[in-house]
Image (cartoon, helix red, strand yellow):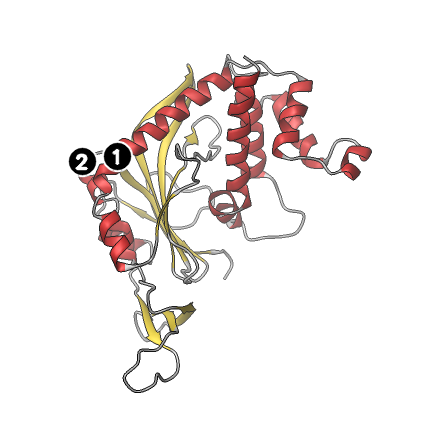
Amino acid sequence: MAHNIDSMAYIGDEPWHGLGNAVHAGASADEMIKQAGLDWTVDKTPIGRAQPGQVGSRFMLTRKARDASEQDVPFGVVSQKYQPLQNLEAFRFFDPFIKRGVASFETAGALGSGERVWVLARMPGQIEIVPGDEVSRYLLLSNTHDGRGSVTIKFTPIRVVCQNTLVLAMKDGEKAFSVRHSRTSMTLRLDEVSSMIGLFQAVFDDAARAFQRMVKTPMDSKRLDAYLETVLPRTPEQRAKGIPERWARIQEAFEEGRPTGHVAGTANTLWAAYNAITYEEDYRKSRTPVPDDSRLNRVWFGEGADRKLVALQKGMELAAAWR
């Protein structure tokens, strides 16, 4: 297919990649699933024949065709203990938040042939870094159908002025809240999701304090190099050659104020340097042609997300050291 997004739905403004179906504000989980093209199910069927009186140990996960125009799509091999989480169940994770007005659906979709399903929900309120520079608060639920992952809930604030996607960790350092694919764990933990509202609020409160410390931390070229060395360490060969290409792009973005949008009070700060790195991860172009939306997979779930989290963690350490 032309894009790596299997299907998608959104509420509000059209996404940057121009894909997906528009859904009215306040849409239900069922409506989001249908408009996102996620109204299919995943079956788990035995592979081969088991011995009489025994249950097979290997099962195939398959995306079932909705009608005669589609074909079944195999996703992967799993054990008997593995419990598929259907798309409707995954979306219902947000029902307590939606009903209480704590969050609202914004986008939902699937990547590839549906191996990864995700839904992005926005929490009300924003984090103000300085006047004119706000960060919106989002939760990203991701579910995999290939048997290799778990349900994860990530904290993904988005900076309004430049649409940089940031990544937060929980207090224990974990990148996301994870729920294993077994009926017991999904039932116990997802049923208690409403009690997690306080946890989510605490993570964003911690982020607000970290961001505000970073914007109060001045930066110069020496400090920028020290910061980049912790996030994108150079090899001995790179040091001998000088400034790596990625360093040069980040330094240029930092000096030109591209990631901060020239908002007063943000230039030449650690906050600007951190956003220069997230800007590089979100918008850098590949040397070889790739699907436009591969960026979404990389910056939310891949190496881009990991690097942005490292950039935040190292930035917080330096902000404390440079006080």
Relative height, residue 160 to residue 287 (above, below): above
Quarter holding residue 103: top left
Q: Which residue is mark 2?
A: 100
Comparing 33 with 13, the one in front is 33
Q: Few, some or many C-alpha atoms within 10 Å of disc 2 (few <14, some 14-19, many ≥20)?
A: few
Q: Position of residue 134 (x, y in %)?
A: 41, 23
Relative height, residue 117 to residue 201 (above, below): below
Q: Position of residue 109 (x, y in %)?
A: 37, 52
Type of amino acid under label 2: Arg
Relative height, residue 13 to residue 218 (above, below): below
Q: Position of residue 263 (x, y in %)?
A: 50, 17
**Which quarter of the rendering shows the C terminus?**
top right
Gap between marks 2 and 1, in whole Å?
A: 10 Å
Name of the residue lying farthest toward the right: 240
Relative height, residue 294 to residue 251 (above, below): below
Is residue 259 at least partly visible in the picture? no
Type of amino acid under label 1: Ile
Q: Are marks 2 and 1 in contact (CB under 8 Å)?
A: yes
Comparing 232 with 283, the one in front is 232
Quarter holding residue 210: top left
Residue in the picture at 52% in, 41% down: 306
Q: Which residue is mark 1?
A: 197
Is residue 47 at least partly visible in the picture? yes
Upstream in the sequence, badge 2 or badge 1? 2
- How many marks do you count on the picture? 2
Q: Is 155 placed left or right of 189 in the picture? A: right
